[in-house]
Amino acid sequence: MTRQKDHNRDYDDNLASGSAIPGTAAAPGAATPGVDAPGTTTPADPAPASIDDVKRYLSDLETIRGLMTRYEEQPLVNHWVFAVWGLLVILGSVINWRFAGAFAVAQLDPLVVVWIPVLLVGSIVETLGGVLKSRDTGIPLLTRRRTRLFIATIGILVILGIIIAHLDRVGFTTTILIALGATPLFIYALATYSDLFTEGFVLLAAAIVIALVGDTVNTLAFRGVGGITVGVVYIIAGAHSAWCERRAGHRDGAAAPQISPDGRRIAASRTSARDGA
């Protein structure tokens, strides 16, 4: 009994000294369980966030979300590109209507002698407008998002080309012409300002109404009027896009707002890349 008490006493002494093995001494410098080692401090619990910190955090999130939305609606081309397209469509429609008889006598296809040149000139102008816009804003022309858009656009245009080639043999209607004119507006609105869906739906609604009216409006002159209408809507879409850009703060290729290291917005620079060169 006495030996058992001595053993228990030795075990309790070892625990108090920090040794886990009965009969052994604690290692020099070893920290006693439950007691901090010399020269160390226990980490303090983080202080709870104040109301001002929460408000600043929410404000930063709102700024970041606004910047993301702003760049999603970045214009792809300069606004005068819409005007050029509109004027080209109006010019092509007038030539097609005015010289339809001469084309028939000479056995010339208006699609080849009028509309393919219109598409080529418009494509060159649009490419130039996209390059200039990319230079002014400092955003690469072929970002990952824009590359996907361009690939999808090429696919859609190929499909439209097949449809147009077929219709060139069987004949166009005013409804089809206006609907074809609305397609680029939907593509562009999908990639930039959603407000530009308005012009696309205006043309689509006009196409539907004409389709309901029937063949009474499918004369050569009325098809010319339909083409002129598409051109005018393109010009209006350009003015609308310019207004959307001013509203979003991107006028004249404005740079993105500067952000401090902690993620807070400092100020929006109104100096274009061209002015800074």
Image (cartoon, grey):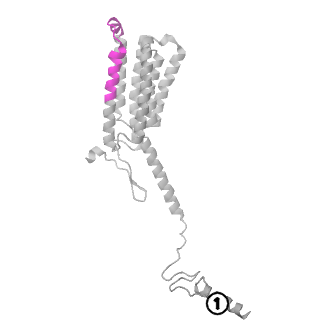
| Residue 94 in view | no
Determine the residue located farthest toward the bottom in the rendered image: 2
The residue positioned 35% from the left and 49% from the top of the image is: 269
**Compared with residue 188, is residue 56 higher up or lower down, i.e. above or below?**
below
Quadrant in the rendering for residue 15: bottom right
Inspect this view and state whether residue 239 appears.
Answer: yes
Residue 12 is one of the magenta-drawn residues? no
Residue 246 % position (x, y) = 39, 41
- Left/right placement of residue 201 relative to residue 150 reads right
Residue at the extreme right = 1
- On the image, the x and y values in percent for residue 51 come to 54, 63
Mark 1 neighbour class, 10 Å CA radius: few under 14, some 14 to 19, many 20 or more: some
Magenta stretch, overall SS: helix
Q: Nearest the camera: 203 or 187?
A: 187
Residue range corresponding to the magenta coloring: 100-124
Numbered-mark total: 1
- Amino acid carrying label 1: it is Asp
Membership of 106 in magenta stretch: yes
Q: Is residue 139 left or right of residue 185?
A: left
Q: Position of residue 258 (x, y in %)?
A: 37, 53
x 35%, y 12%: residue: 109
Residue depicted at 42% across the width and 26% down the height? 157
Nearest the viewer among 167 and 52 is 167
Q: Nearer the viewer, residue 5 or 222?
A: 5
Q: Where does label 1 land, which residue?
A: 10
In terms of secondary structure, where does tag 1 sit?
helix
> Which quadrant holds the N terminus?
bottom right
